[in-house]
Amino acid sequence: MPLETSGPIVFLERGLDYVFKGWIDEHTFAPSKPGTGMVVAVKKLKQESFQGHREWLTEVNYLGMLSHENLVKLIGYCSESENKLLVYEYMPKGSLENHLFRKGVQLMPWAIRMRIAVDVAKGLSFLHSLDANVIYRDLKASNVLLDSEFNAKLSDFGLAREGPKGDRTHVSTRVVGTRGYAAPEYIATGHLTPKSDVYSFGVVLLELLSGKRATGDENAGGAEETLVDWAKPFLSDSRKVLRIMDSRLGGQYSKKGAQTAAALALRCLQNDPKNRPPMTEVLAALEQLLALGSAPRILGQANRENKMNDKFSPHRTMRDIRQSR
């Protein structure tokens, strides 16, 4: 399937690849002129990367088989000689990392943050519920992409692995990933389970609550102190937990909702993986938080503020889950 970019627009360079913005015909998938047809994101593997080739194959295998509203859609791929491309749906809002940490980007209100947490939990719950028990293994803010309405989708499946089957409690693998997100038992032993993803989700949820990076770069403890290290003493005390909240929110969130979300993050971040809840339980807790009216009430406040200052764009998330092979 020959696919190529329409124009030399590089809008992101990652460790093992470049990402281009391109356009293709919606029906034939042939390249089209910039601004016409369907806009797509095209990831091109760096030719010198053997590790990247292995991850490229993994991504084709998983995203070629799986379909879900909270996984980024793989439209096609190309493998010609040394050129290896992956073509995805284009996510116009970019990454969660940019919206949480980049200066000059509009602040996301509480309701949007909680809906992103639900979307990420849906994606992970779907992966863990498959017969293959897929472990994502690379959950971080930069791999959560947002569409025009802030619906969140998981991207970059190069590190995904099938989980343990039968009587096996874990799979053993080389330790890869990003500092601050990986579960402690995985770093120490290379033992990988779905609970490793639960820990990483707890970190991302903590980023959503605090507006601070997982690596803890902004914390008083310096470069050696991660966000989890800094936040855990506050998470374990309901009287102090609001101290971790993103000050840029200006208190525009439900106190009870924030305490509930923080308590859930603490459960996900338990050092013993057996004490972490499964993602289905995490998802149910987050959806219950929304159903109780904590986030929708604040979203209503944000909507009224939007009419006054045009600062935010609320969204709705899709509810149906679809799987195809």
Image (cartoon, helix red, strand yellow):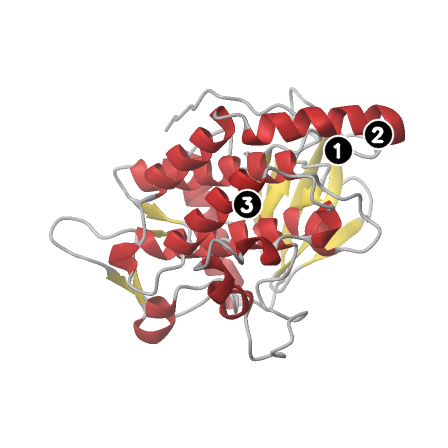
Q: Earlier in the sequence, mark 3 or mark 2?
A: 2
Viewer-proximal residue, 289 or 94?
Answer: 289
Q: Residue type at mark 1? A: Trp
Quarter holding the N terminus?
top right
Q: Position of residue 144 (x, y in %)?
A: 58, 46
Residue 36 visible, this orientation: no
Q: Secondary structure at mark 1?
A: strand
Viewer-proximal residue, 167 or 99?
Answer: 99
Query: Local crowd at mark 1 within 10 Å, few (<14), some, or many (≥20)?
Result: many
Query: Local crowd at mark 2 within 10 Å, few (<14), some, or many (≥20)?
Result: few
Q: Is residue 245 left or right of residue 241?
A: right
Q: Position of residue 177 (x, y in %)?
A: 48, 65
Quarter holding residue 150 = top right
Q: Residue type at mark 2? A: Gly
Q: Residue type at mark 3? A: Ser
Quarter holding the C terminus?
top left
Q: Reply above or below: 12 against 113.
A: below
The residue that mark 1 highlights is 23
Quarter holding residue 127 = top left
Tell me what residue is drawn at x 48 percent, y 66 percent.
233
Query: Local crowd at mark 3 within 10 Å, few (<14), some, or many (≥20)?
Result: many
The residue that mark 3 highlights is 155
Residue farthest to the left, as pictured: 167
Kindly indicate whether the residue at mark 2 contacts the one at mark 1 (C-beta within 8 angstroms).
yes
Q: Earlier in the sequence, mark 1 or mark 2?
A: 1
Q: Reply above or below: 74 against 163.
A: above
Tell me what residue is drawn at x 57 percent, y 38 percent.
114
Quarter holding residue 151 = top right
Q: Is residue 222 left or right of residue 57?
A: right
Residue 248 visible, this orientation: yes
The residue that mark 2 highlights is 35
Mark 3 or 2: the one toward you: 3
